[in-house]
Image: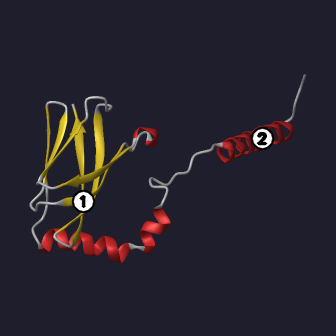
Amino acid sequence: MYMNWGTKIVLVLAIFVIGMAAVGFYMVGQDQDSLVESDYYERGINFDEVYQRRENLDQLQAKPTVILQNDTLQIRFVHRGNQGQLRLKRSSDASLDLSEDVAISGDVFLLPVADLERGAWDLHLEWEAEGHPFLHEQTIYMN
């Protein structure tokens, strides 16, 4: 069968358009949101509060020491009597995220992490001590 060059161009364009439409339908059909955090917009609205928590951390020199030792995450606070929330986020799989309440009278919080996947985790720690709110974030690596 013989085709002229005009027929070949139309055929290639038709295949290209069908391919692009298929890719578009596939992408729209995915049930994933590209946002890292589900409360992204709410956090943006509360930026002043987050900023103040970070400033308190620097101004009051309250940065905690985070140590990963023997499958235990140890957080040593500067102040005693800390209450707040610890979140460990896995950027590769949100279903592995972990959230723990922090309520200690002393200055050391211990969390067993032997069951967590190895690799990089984002540690997000919000707490209050001596009437001041604080926020500390860092990346830790599970070996």
Q: Answer with the quarter of the image where residue 115 lies.
A: top left
Query: What residue is pinned by disc 2?
Result: 18
- In this picture, residue 17 sits left or right of residue 122: right
Q: Amino acid at mark 1?
A: Gln
Q: Nearer the viewer, residue 71 or 120?
A: 71
Q: Earlier in the sequence, mark 1 or mark 2?
A: 2
- At horizontal 62% and vertical 44% (from top left) the residue drawn is 31
Q: Can you say whether 42 is above or below 92 in the image?
A: below
- At horizontal 37% and vertical 73% (from top left) the residue drawn is 47
Query: What residue is pinned by disc 1?
Result: 83
In the picture as drawn, the residue positioned furthest to the top comes out as 1
Where disc 1 sits, the SS reads strand
- In this picture, residue 133 sits left or right of residue 99: left
Quadrant that contains the N terminus: top right
- Residue 64 lies, in percent from the top left, at 13, 56
In the picture as drawn, the residue positioned furthest to the right comes out as 1
